[in-house]
Amino acid sequence: MSTHDNVLRVGMVGYAFMGAAHSQAWRTVNRVYDLPAQVRMALVCGRDEPKVAEAAGRLGWDGHTTDWRRLVESDEIDVVDICTPGDSHCEIALAALAAGKHVLCEKPLANTVEEARQMTAAAARAQTAGVRAMCGFNYRRVPAVALMRRLVADGRLGEIRHVRAVYLQDWIVDPQFPLVWRLQKDRAGSGALGDIGAHIIDLTQYVTGQLITGVSAVTETFVKERPLPAGSSGLAAQADGNGRATGRVTVDDAAVFVARLDGGALATYEATRFATGRKNALRVEINGSLGSVVFDLERLNELEFLDATRPAAEQGFSRILVTEPEHPYLSAWWPPGHIIGYEHSFTHQMRDFVEAVATGVDPTPSFADALQVQLVLDAVTRSAERAAWTEVEPALAEVAA
Ligand SMILES: NC(=O)c1ccc[n+]([C@@H]2O[C@H](COP(=O)([O-])OP(=O)(O)OC[C@H]3O[C@@H](n4cnc5c(N)ncnc54)[C@H](O)[C@@H]3O)[C@@H](O)[C@H]2O)c1
């Protein structure tokens, strides 16, 4: 926390998709929520000077730099917000924590378990000096998801038996879609698995309060060669039938797995970028001994709930419109029925982060929570390679090692 009049000076690295979403949330958070600290959008970092200068003006940052090390080491920065691809999360987070900066890092935490373990250990060391670290699994902050967790925690679903989670996209169905960073293992760590599978792993563990202990997985890369993006270099390129330079896709296009949770539930997960017609379809259904609940991101203001303790003749899924002031995060927004959207999950994320930092509390999901997700991703990858049931390695042993 800055000593400067309860001001948190934020420096953000990366200004594209997540950079824009985070900027919107940093701009908004103090105008919606009454918080113990004021955010100052101090510095944004990108690699291209004219582009980052333009982005700083457009997104509302006071200054810009092309050197993330300068940002991380600056005395003018209290919080480092990491919005870059996974291959730079570890290096930036370690440097930021060593410099005593609070860190918000986009998901997945890292590209490997080894990196995630280093980051978690660094966060634990920094925590002893009051430095906070959090990973950006923003879907936890959708009010309907938080309500879903509350219903489970309050025992309204009874004993959880089934978790059914899918996250479906279709943006690379076209084999001519170029080989962007998300399709390169050295940049992204994995494909659909780490990008969107990580979200449903975190979301279901958060909602149920149960951790995945073992998995049996299959993964597939349907399109193995793709055209190189315009202006790219340094990839092992070869020519396709039309003479265009192509490169090898080194990540999964889709990952499907079954899992056991430590509270006894059975779970199924599907993460794919080949679900033709599905743009960003995250759906989770949970069945318990006393009821069921369903969340669908494309209808994110709603939650379907079935209360099996009601008389059989009156039972049925009811649609809860999650816009009441009693619902999580919503008292600061609009009158009931005036719905919110995707970007609000990021405002809620910043609210929780700022509140935790300003009041000296550890925010969640912590780096340790995100390491546990990374261990599940790793177990899925190993299971698919071995075609065998694979236990998730224990997170605590990893941290202590
Ligand atoms: N929470 C979510 O829902 C969600 C959604 C999308 C992406 N993400 C995560 O956010 C991160 C970024 O993804 P994105 O979609 O914003 O990617 P993107 O390609 O849109 O943006 C990446 C940004 O990082 C910058 N960058 C890359 N390497 C850099 C470096 N070494 N130094 C400075 N800047 C650098 C790029 O110039 C660009 O501005 C990833 O970890 C991704 O998994 C999270």
Image (cartoon, grey):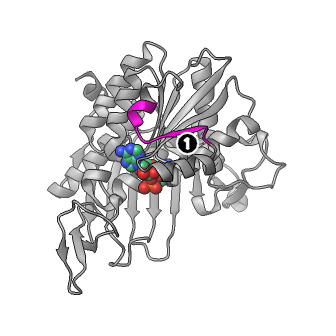
Which residue type does callout 1 highlight? Gly
- Asked if 195 appears above or below 12 in the picture, the reply is below
The residue at the far front in this view is: 50
* Span of residues in magenta: 61-71
The residue at the far right in this view is: 335
- Asked if 355 appears above or below 240 in the picture, the reply is above
Q: Residue at x 28, y 58 (%)?
A: 184
Q: Residue at x 27, y 73 (%)?
A: 226
Instruction: State which quadrant residue 68 falls in.
Output: top left
Q: Does the rendering let one see residue 262?
A: no
- Asked if 233 appears above or below 399 in the picture, the reply is below
- Residue situated in front as seen by the camera: 3 or 210: 3
In the visual, does 324 lie left or right of 272?
A: right
Q: Residue at x 22, y 23 (%)?
A: 401
Quadrant location of the N terminus? top right
Instruction: Classify mark 1: residues with Cα within 10 Å, few (<14), some (14-19) or many (20+).
Output: some
In the visual, does 251 lie left or right of 354?
A: left
Verify whether residue 63 appears in magenta: yes
Verify whether residue 290 appears in magenta: no
Identify the secondary structure beneath mark 1.
loop
Give the image location of residue 22, x and y in percent. 57, 45
- Residue situated in front as seen by the camera: 389 or 277: 277
Give the image location of residue 88, x and y in percent. 34, 42
Give the image location of residue 201, x and y in percent. 42, 48
In the visual, does 113 lie left or right of 350?
A: left
- Asked if 111 appears above or below 252 in the picture, the reply is above
The answer as to whether callout 1 falls within 8 Å of ligand 1 is no
- Residue situated in front as seen by the camera: 52 or 401: 52
Residue on which the image places disc 1: 158
Give the image location of residue 348, x and y in percent. 64, 40
- The number of callouts visible is 1
Q: Does the rendering let one see residue 173?
A: yes
